[in-house]
Image: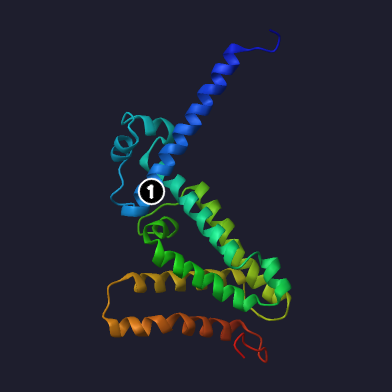
Amino acid sequence: MWGWHPVGRVISIRKQQADETREKLVSLAWEMVRKHGIDSFTVKHLAQKAGVAVGLPYSYFRTRDGLIDELRVRAWDRLEQILQATVGTPEQAAQRGDIETSIRRAMETIVDFALREPHVYELVILRPGMTLSQRVLEREIRTAQRLVQLLYKGQEQGEFRFRGDPTVFALALWTGVQGYVERMGAKTAPMFRNYQEKVLDEMFDIFFARVRIKGMKTPSS
């Protein structure tokens, strides 16, 4: 008898049910956006797919943008998992002594991710007129720090020398990769696509030629 709190138990059950419903809505929205993109996604369609009242999702996310933010965070989580599996941490790259190779591999992984999951990649890029919420911005910075830390590790180990803040160089590299993905995602003539597939290596070569300390061997040498 002692320790039995029926009101507390009911509250706990309701909270669990609410959490499960929220996760169901996010997971269903994720699959809808993953298949069809952000632009075609509506909360009304989500509610219909979930078999709930049209207003229910708003009780969890307030607005469509709030729900999209949830998906943006999940997309960054997914990208982080892929980078971790492919490259590992900056500390591990430093221990292996392959900082430059790891940066190239990380960027190639992002390109592969973007081309395989274009609608998910839409969730992690800045679009014209888009405003990032503080939560999404903080999540983006957390993943971006992986690239920044790799550059810093290269500097610490005497591989790179930067004229300025390495963060600017990280942003330049990320911006270049985004532009490359947009070109690769466009429908172009086969002859131009053959050229585009060689552009990524050239872009990396130009970048590292600028920051690599003269006399250092390239990963392929």
Residue at screen point 59% across, 12% down: 6
Whether residue 66 is visible to the viewer of this picture, yes or no, is no
* Residue 137 placement (x, y as % from top left): 51, 53
Res. 92 image quadrant: bottom right
Residue at screen point 28% across, 50% down: 40
Give the camera-side residue of 11 and 64.
Answer: 11
Above-or-below relation of 101 to 10: below
Residue position marked by numbered label 1 in the rendering: 31
Q: Say left or right for 137 vs 152.
A: left
Above-or-below relation of 140 to 114: above
Residue at screen point 51% across, 55% down: 78
Q: Residues within 10 Å of mark 1 (few under 14, many from 20)?
A: few
Q: Which quadrant is home to the C terminus?
A: bottom right
Residue at screen point 37% across, 62% down: 118
* Residue 192 placement (x, y as % from top left): 31, 83
Q: Which quadrant is home to the N terminus?
A: top right
